[in-house]
Image: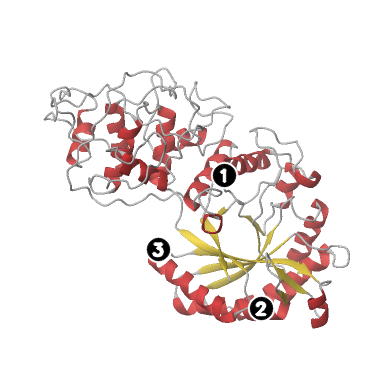
Amino acid sequence: MITRRLFVPIVALGAVAATTLALSPAATAAPETSQATPAASSGFSDVPAASAFYGDITWLVQQNITNGYKDGGFHPTYAVSRQSMAAFLYREQNPGKTAPACTKKAFNDVPTTSPFCADINWLVSQNVTKGFSDDGFHPTSAVSRQSMAAFLYRLDHAGADAPGCSKAPFPDVPAGSQFCGAISWLAGQDISGGYADGRFHPNDAVSRQSMAAFLHRFAAPAPAVSVSRYVRTSDPQVMQTAGTDDATTDATNKVSSRLHLLQTGAQTNSDAQIKAAGAPGVVLSQTSLRLTYAQLVTLLSGYISAYATASSAPVTIAIGTNSDGDFSSYTATQKGKDWWNEVIAPLRAAAPAGVTVVGANDIEPGFAATAAQATNWKSAFLAASGDAQLFINGSADGCPTKFGNTTATCNNGWTPAQLKALYSGAQVSALPQVYLQAQADQWANIAMAAGSATPNFVGSLTQVDTCGSGCSWSPQRGWIALWDALTAAGITPKLSYASDLTVSS
């Protein structure tokens, strides 16, 4: 379900000094990367299958922010006029409402008979703009990208101007620019990452398709972000503290239902330390730590108990392994059975009220398991109990990224169709990793690959806390990217979760 951000009423006064640009198609520099994905049909005659902004424009229509032009087109590359910007912002902030009749003009160039008069008056009443020094609004002039940043900043900050910059966010936005603060905020919120040339192009006109992307990201439809963790510690106190911290985060965000993934590592029975213990277990990822299943259950029980004690919010905690490791002496079938019998079942049996424990596996074509072995693991895990639930949270390593390519192979000879089948099933939920645009496109292709079953996509998983903004999108951006990808693939998204991986060590 898509939820809308709640905004603080705007009370302060601030003006937007816009560069006056002609109302014409937007600049032709390398287009800004969008989180959207191509689609078969957008509902507009000029937004074809190859459009990179399909998901954003679809969202704009679904939110009743635009119906396009009378000729049936959206005119995606046309510049956004200042009067259209006023209308877009009014509709985004007032869903389902029509601006009241205009009885008094706010500017000398906006008569009361203008169809945009009420929207522009609202923009003034919200203290987002007071127009130009000539007492005009310049309604048909194009909105520059720097002015768009100022509009959105003030709309989100009670009409206040953005503070000054100590560092330039882009090479063409110096720290001394009056728009530097707003543009820095825009980049920090993952609303804009600039152009492929690394610049922001502040004086360029905002195209209608880019405006769709900016508004989509600004509205932040993603659910509140939950914390997921790589477990890289054998210290129970560390995990208990993590459980308390995560429960506190949930309470702060005031959400009633969350998903936490506790990702461990590969299952093993051949490691010397595991052999010495006389029982199989796991190798915690990127560590030298080996834990038997019994030790792992003890470690994770502390997290679960601490979470339940610190918060009354219902939570699903998915306990994850990955499809790496040795499959010659420890078969995929036996691994699947053991993950249920030795890890999930005892944790679930001891879970306090309000906590649901389920299984998880980071299954992807970049790990050691073949598609057949991954399928055997999944089947064995689910067959171990009639009510076993499994979250699969892998990435689509090496799979095709060009929209519509559903047949080219992925890493290790896997195919999109195999991944589609693997991620599907009545007891299976898909939580794909979406760090950047290529991954969103991969999941669109997987969703459209051969096979009648469609994966039950429940959300997205990012890694910005661990990896940083240079190699991973924010959870909100990843969620929007997946939403757009599935919309483009003809699937109505029902994404309940957005989660980000951090580390407990």
Q: Residue at x 44, y 21 (%)?
A: 73
Q: CA distance from mark 1 to mark 3?
A: 25 Å
Mark 3 Cα-neighbour bin, 10 Å: few <14, some 14–19, many ≥20: few
Q: Is residue 57 above or below residue 231?
A: above
Q: Which of the image's four quarters has the C terminus?
A: bottom right
Position of 180 compared to 336: left or right?
Answer: left
- Mark 1 / mark 3, whichever is N-terminal: 3
What's under tag 2, amino acid-wise? Val
Q: Do callouts 1 and 3 mark residues in contact (Cβ within 8 Å)?
A: no
Residue drawn at (44%, 23%), measured in percent from left and top?
Answer: 77
Percent of width and height locating residue 301: 60, 79
The label number, if any, that marks residue 107 in the structure image: none
- The image shows residue 297 at horizontal and vertical percentages of 66, 78
Residue receiving disc 3: 253
Q: Is residue 308 visible?
A: yes
* SS class, disc 3: helix
Q: Amino acid at mark 1?
A: Leu
Across and down, in percent, residue 236 comes to 59, 80
Question: Which of 481/427 is in front?
Answer: 481
Q: What residue does disc 1 label? A: 436
Q: CA distance from mark 2 to mark 3?
A: 28 Å
First in sequence: mark 1 or mark 2?
A: 2
Mark in front: 1 vs 3: 1
* Residue type marked 3: Asn
Label 2 with label 3: CB-CB less than 8 Å:
no
Horizontally, residue 106 falls left or right of residue 25, namely left
Q: Which residue is mark 2?
A: 297
The image quarter containing residue 337 is bottom right
Q: How is the image coloured?
A: secondary structure
How many discs appear?
Answer: 3
